[in-house]
Image (cartoon, coloured by chain):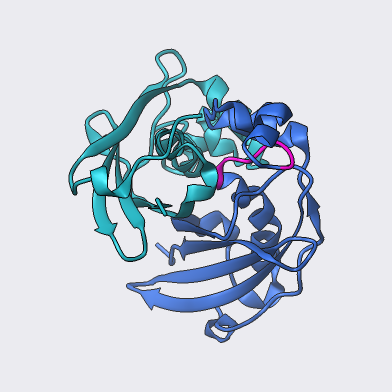
Chain colours: A cyan, B blue
Amino acid sequence: MSTTPALESLSVGDVVAGGSFALTRDSLVRYAGASGDFNPIHYRDDVAVSVGLPGVLAHGMLTMGFAVQPVVDWVGDPARIVDYQVRFTRPVLVDPVDGAVVTVVARVGVIDAEARVARIDLTVTFNDQTVLGKAQARVSLA
Amino acid sequence: MNPELQGRVFPPAPPYLVGREKVREFSRAVFATNPINHDPEAARAAGYADVVAPPTFAVVVQEATLAQLLSEPGAGIDFSRVVHGDQRFSFSRPIVAGDELTATLTVASVKSLGGHSMVTAESNVLDATGAHVVTATSTLVVRGDE
């Protein structure tokens, strides 16, 4: 486990973590089973198309789930994640052959020195467009 | 959607017992590779009773409460028109295998916006001792007639 970052060492705008996540249709089936979300728009093209989507989409909660992992690994202890929120703004289309690559960059957004909490803002992109809005994790660095 | 839902508190969902293999399965699904998510020894070394669930595992516990809301006959929510707008988790502590969790949903707000309705549901998750673990808040958008 990594050591906890010191609040004093952070500046607003610092990139503190990030990663690239290669999703395949297998990832979606795995998440469906793990989460219990069996909405067929996440594994059946015919159903996705019938409701007006271009194709099978990743679960928003899957994207929310892995997007915070670089931050969890950076702070070392998941107990330091005190709050995590996102807005689902754009779908991640997962091609049956090529899959989809989603990129996460985590930056320091706000430092609350009194509460010893840093707000880490996540920029989560697929095909050069952000897919999550207001994606923020508050981490306690007390 | 029925605006009188605002403020409604649903009965607690049946207790959810967090299993070690479920935590491992969920961790693999969200690319959580930290040993404390998979290895009980590593988790104990870090001060936890058993493997630690990734932050968004709370949605699995929350799900039963959202099912209560969506299946409520008086709610007037057409599931086929529901889109997940926002999600938030506010933690007192991480979820750990062995936890027996009880979630209770409160309808925090119901709003109408340009033909669509938005419902914000807060599920308060407590452990077996009654201590707060996490509050999971979902905003669902119910699309209006096209």
Instruction: Determine whether B78 is above or below A61 in the image.
Output: below
Front residue of this view, candidates A116 and A59: A116
Q: In terms of depth relative to the viewer, which is nearer, A74 or A29? A: A74
Looking at the image, the residue that sits furthest to the bottom is: B4
Residue A64 versus residue A1 in the image, above or below: below
B100 with respect to A92 (left or right):
right
Give the quarter of the image for residue B118.
Answer: bottom left
**Residue B77 magenta-highlighted:** no
Q: Residue B7 location in percent, x, y?
A: 58, 84
Q: Is residue B101 left or right of residue A20?
A: right
**Residue B123: x %, y % from top left:** 61, 66
Give the residue at x 43% y 26%: A94
* Quarter of the figure with residue B132: bottom right
Residue A71 placement, left or right of A46: left
> Residue at point 52% right, 83% down?
B3
Q: Give above or below for B112 relative to A38.
A: below
Res. A103 in view: no
The percent position of residue A38, horizontal first and vertical second, equals 64, 39
Residue in the foreground of this view, choosing between B52 and A136: B52
Q: Which residues are magenta?
A: B49-55
Q: Is residue B52 magenta?
A: yes
Q: Residue at x 65, y 28 (%)?
A: B42
Q: Which SS type dominates the magenta stretch?
A: loop
Coordinates of residue A130 in the picture (x, y in percent): 27, 40
